[in-house]
Amino acid sequence: MIRPLATLIGIVLACAAPVAAQPVPISIGETHVLASKPLAQDRVVNVYLPADYATSGKSYPVLYLIDGGLDQDFLHVVGTTALGALWARSQPVIVVGIATQDRRRELTGPTRDAELLKRYPTAGHSAEFRSFIRDELMPMVASRYRTSSESGVMGESLAGLFIVETFLTEPDLFDHYAAISPSLWWDKARLAQGAAGLLKTPMLKPHRLYLTIADEGGEMQAATDQLVSSLAANPREGRAWCYAPHQQLTHATIYHSVSPEALQYLFPTPVEQDPQSGFDIACQSPRS
């Protein structure tokens, strides 16, 4: 049986795969480029807004993320905040990811260690990085987004060192702090050694500190133990802290594993979770 050409064309078209619609880009946030005077350079800042931001009319806490570039920690921390909010494990937050460029320049304090300065000649300008956050970034965020009065900061390794330094020297810059395996070995552990005196720095509002360390050993563990001992020996009204070491993890694996716990401590919810959820935080006492 011979069929008309039009019929054959119709059969071919009917059997063909449907034409796909044009793909739609996935958007998870916004990128700003700030011309910073303290840093004397442009700085990239990435911002994620909670899922219901556009429709809720609510104001949200802000999490400032050190090492918040798209090729750094922004994407995985944004995912963790979204999952924490979904489970009511932690509050939904605006994430402000601050991309770092020269981490030893931006995240370490001044040092007189000749060996460190020889290896890292640009090191020691954390004060300028803090000034950028305080005087330029925070006002921009407050002016453009619906922020509550609550803020926190999170980071790992050298970013954790910067966070501990800020907690000790300028505690009112943020409300809450999460330092994950902070590089307290830096500068022969000078920051940890001076912690007892720095913990007397005046503060005007309550603060929380979440501190954790992986199986680091050596200088890292010794410096962390010294910081924890100083915290325990200098209790203060309005300052809460949790030391939750994770010795089963390594420096390379700890961030992804503990960031949900850190966010839970920084931005808790009133929800009473089922113990089987596994959302308990095991804060430990300092070593004797």
Image (spheres, grey):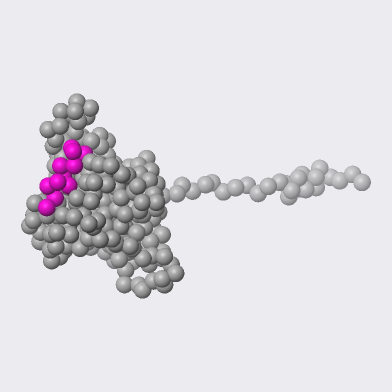
Q: Nearer the viewer, residue 68 or 59?
A: 68
Residue positioned 19% across, 33% down in the render:
123
The quarter of the displayed image where residue 204 is located:
bottom left
**Relative vertical location of residue 186 with respect to residue 203 in this rendering, above or below:** above
Q: Main secondary structure of the magenta part?
A: helix
Image position, residue 85 (x, y; %): 37, 63
Above or below: residue 90 compared with residue 213:
below
Please state the extent of the stretch shown in magenta in the rendering: 186-196
**Residue 21 is at least partly visible in this image:** yes
Identify the image quadrant of the C terminus: bottom left
Closest to the observer, 1 or 168:
168
Residue at (28, 60) in percent of width and height? 284
Q: Position of residue 184 (x, y in %)?
A: 22, 44
Question: Residue 55 is drawn in which quadrant?
Answer: bottom left
Residue sitting nearer the eye, 8 or 268: 268
Would you say residue 191 sits in the magenta stretch? yes
- The residue shown at (89%, 44%) is 2
Answer left or right for 6 relative to 109. right
Residue 170 appears in the figure:
no
Residue 247 spot, x, y in % from top left: 36, 51
Q: Position of residue 223 (x, y in %)?
A: 22, 46
Is 170 in front, or is 97?
Answer: 170
In the rendered image, the vertical position of residue 207 relative to residue 33, given as above or below: below
Is residue 269 part of the magenta span, yes or no?
A: no
Image point (52%, 47%), residue name: 23
Q: Hey, which residue is sitting farthest top in the picture?
A: 118
Residue situated furthest right in the rendering: 1
